[in-house]
Image (cartoon, rainbow, N blue to C red):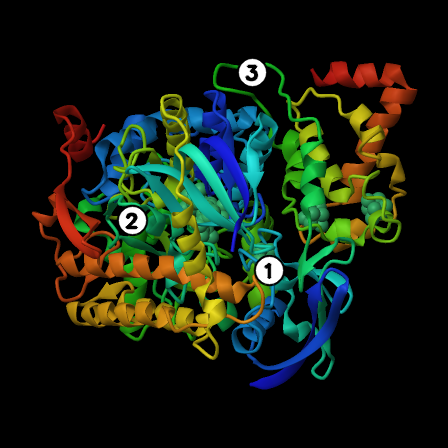
Amino acid sequence: MEISERHEHDVLVIGAGGAGLRAAIAAIEAGASVGLVGKSLLGKAHTVMAEGGMAAALGNNRPEDNWQVHFRDTMRGGKGLCDWRMARAHAAEAPDRVRELEAWGALFDRAEDGRMNQRPFGGHTYGRLAHVGDRTGLEMIRTLQDHAVHEGADVFMECTVFRLILVDGRVAGALAYWRPTGEFVLFRARTVILATGGLGKAWKVTSNSWECTGDGVALAYGAGAELMGMEFVQFHPTGMVWPPSVRGTLVTEGVRGEGGVLTNGDGERFMFRYVPEMFEGDYAESEEEADRWVEGDRTANRRPPELLTRDVVAKAIVAEVEAGRGSPHGGVFLNISEKRSPEYIKAKLPSMYHQFKELAGVDITTDAMEVGPTTHYAMGGVKVDPETAATCVPGLYAAGEVAAGLHGGNRLGGNSLSDLIVFGQRAGAAAAQEAGDVSFAEIPASELSAAVAGATAPFARDGGRNPFGLQEELQAVMQDKVGIARTERALREALEDVHRLRGALDTCSVRGGRAFNPGWHTWLDLHAMLTVAEAVVLSALERRESRGAHTRIDCPDSDASLGRVNLVIRSSDGRMVTDTEAVSEPPAELRQLIEEGV
Amino acid sequence: MAERTFKVYRGSGDDGQLESYTIEVDQGMVVLDAIHRIQAEHAPDLAVRWNCKAGKCGSCSCEVNGRPRLTCMTRLSDYEEGESITVTPMKAFPVIKDLVADVSRAYRNNASIPRFRPRPRDAEDGWRMKQFEIERAQEMRKCIECFLCQDVCHVLRSHGKHAEFIGPTYLVRTAGYSLNPIDVEDRSAFLKESGGIGFCNITKCCTEVCPESISITDNAIIPLKERVVDRFYDPVKALVRLVRRR
Ligand SMILES: Cc1cc2nc3c(=O)[nH]c(=O)nc-3n(C[C@H](O)[C@H](O)[C@H](O)COP(=O)(O)OP(=O)(O)OC[C@H]3O[C@@H](n4cnc5c(N)ncnc54)[C@H](O)[C@@H]3O)c2cc1C
Ligand code: SF4
Ligand code: SF4
Ligand code: FES
């Protein structure tokens, strides 16, 4: 089987979500030729689904807001594990990156004075999220997509990279297949940026699409890069729970940002009971105070406890359900109809209104939604240099959800979209600069034919396992044994399961031809999902404490010494091993900022 | 739990036929769920596009019993028990395989639209706009690029004017730029010539199928047509409009 097509670019960007598009634009601005590859059609990457908004300390609603407050919120939300340099760059650069989107055609909702409006979200001291109703991701991706196309990015849609090619230890390109035809394509490049997004598809209940199989994590790991913080998978507190076919579909935090209230099966507004020590005094202490805040009096009142960080809210919901105080379908109730008028709800949360009406037959302007946790976001991922987003593999960069460091043990809502544009831009600029100093490498044909033979192997087998069955089994393992509440015992079992499923990959067979064959695609994606699964399980075993999104019921407390290290995963003699690495200490003035406030 | 039979288009190009599959269906299932169940249980090589499963990405467009629909937002309970459900790819596009249509032409159309060009910033930190001024443009920017309007438009579907007419999806996209209060680009020549806006005879079929409830004809196409008319047949009005916007 032959490679039917070859392309050459200074910079190859793998991934066409917010991070990849922004990286492509930055690389083009720096004079590089750019190839942009994505698994779906352009504009359909996961970013399109982002709802609530994008965090940036513009200070439009509250002049007290500035990068220092945003930095502090991010660091505190991350439970001590954020890279302070990334958190600082993110907070400092997000405002310019957001304003730039307007210059490229984005239209965010306005405040009275004509500037961008900003909405409150969990863990953010002030209303900080620039947004468009509840379709912020759509606005972002359309804007970036049209800008990148007009700037001259060479776009390859529905094309999946399954192997990075190294020559003399440097990344020299990538091998991909066209999904529509199954033909193989070789991309040669001077530098490569991974912007492949998340990995939630390894769990059964998830807000993530089929694309989120952690390909970038696996590609980087396979090329010798290090992974970090893989135990930190964010379970978003509010996914749909009913009907079964939409279980996991996201209900934006914007519902709570706009005043939505969580109650249990007994009708109790339970979040008041779950305010952690660290945040005591930052949240309203009575329903009346919370109501006054929702009504707009935000200086004299504190925000409702529904706006605590996601890890806290998700765990509270699980605790309520386990105590027998759940809703009929095993969640809790989220109700905005008592706090806002139908017109307001439809204007501010139109797609939530639509989603519940069409898919669950619930009118959220009059009735409560039933919600429960759903696998949502990977804080961990490929370890990168905090300034340039470079990995430890020469020529290889990573930005966006695939990269680790900014969010530590828990990400604040809205901090992902801003992460994409801040670090997408940084990665694109750095990769373009490095590309100026290196030349294209010759890639040995033998390596390519071996990779192609491996990728097509299941076509030659007959009567083997169906890849969809294997995928379902993995999702059940991760859901049941590597979910919100973890134990050493379940994790050990999960590790064995993952090894067993890895072995089963070689017994799968695929029917039909190579043209648009989802069974084959799933088989290929499973390689990445299993690498991700193993890394998550190993890290979760190693972190014998509870912190942020990682909860060990057998080690329920935080361990201060573990709060100073990140877990790093690398390949050693073909085996996956974990290691610890000290979190770098911020300089004194920033430390003071984090501890004492602005 | 009940059983239901689906007829699904299988094949590539014009070389295909409807195949029947019977599966168990659960409460609340949508057509896309049924396709996925068929894929997992009977036909792992059945091709279909999807991403969000919540009506936000516009990937899963097909025709269900001949009507252009987002399959992820079409509930099985919308069809009588006993009524058969037939799923076929969008008719106005070439078929790649099974339910997957070749939409590459649409992306080329999009790239041909003169890009957004803003007036100079109103202040150092950007532009000042009132919410009511941007509502029309925001309506256009709700478009999820599902191509259902493109699929239903008779100019494309029945008359095949793909080379001459960019179609409703991209008239909506153009309107999204042109109705942005800070945009200063004049796209009327483009609309008149390569955009082929004259082919649209305002039948409103596109508006009827839009899952985002965009008033495609009234709020996008008619205002754009007016601009073209002003620009080419009433230059004074065009000038006034331009000055007013500045
Ligand atoms: C429902 C939902 C709502 C959200 N709302 C918000 C919000 O309001 N605010 C916020 O800040 N965050 C939000 N998030 C999180 C945020 O949307 C994501 O973290 C972010 O969009 C990820 O962007 P990305 O550019 O890193 O990757 P993605 O947008 O996921 O893009 C990844 C790209 O990589 C491509 N790719 C992957 N693997 C390969 C491969 N092997 N070969 C080629 N291409 C590949 C994909 O095709 C895709 O183009 C939300 C997430 C979800 C699921
Ligand atoms: S109104 Fe115009 S664009 Fe819409 S379907 Fe009719 S002819 Fe096509
Ligand atoms: S205008 Fe409506 S129907 Fe047409 S592509 Fe956009 S969302 Fe789909
Ligand atoms: S899958 Fe996204 S609109 Fe249907």
Mark 2 secondary-structure assignment: helix
Q: Chain of mark 3?
A: B
* Residue nearer the viewer, B219 or A486: A486
The disc placed on residue A515 is 1
Residue A422, how many percent across, how many down?
39, 31
Would you name the residue on which mark 3 appears? B121
Are there few (<14), some (14-19), or many (20+) residues within 10 Å of tag 2?
A: many
Kind of residue sitting beneath label 2: Tyr
The answer, for residue A449, to whether it is visible in the render is yes
Mark 1 secondary-structure assignment: loop
Same chain assignment for discs 1 and 2: yes
Would you name the residue on which mark 2 appears? A221
Kind of residue sitting beneath label 3: Arg
Mark 3 secondary-structure assignment: loop
* Residue nearer the viewer, B5 or A258: B5
Are there few (<14), some (14-19), or many (20+) residues within 10 Å of tag 3?
A: few
Residue B34 shown left or right of residue A417 in the figure = right
Residue A523, how many percent across, how many down?
44, 64
Q: CA distance from mark 2 to mark 3?
A: 45 Å
Q: Please name which of the two marks, 1 or 2, marks the residue nearer to the observer.
A: 1
Q: Residue reaching furthest left?
A: A561
Q: How many tags in the picture?
A: 3
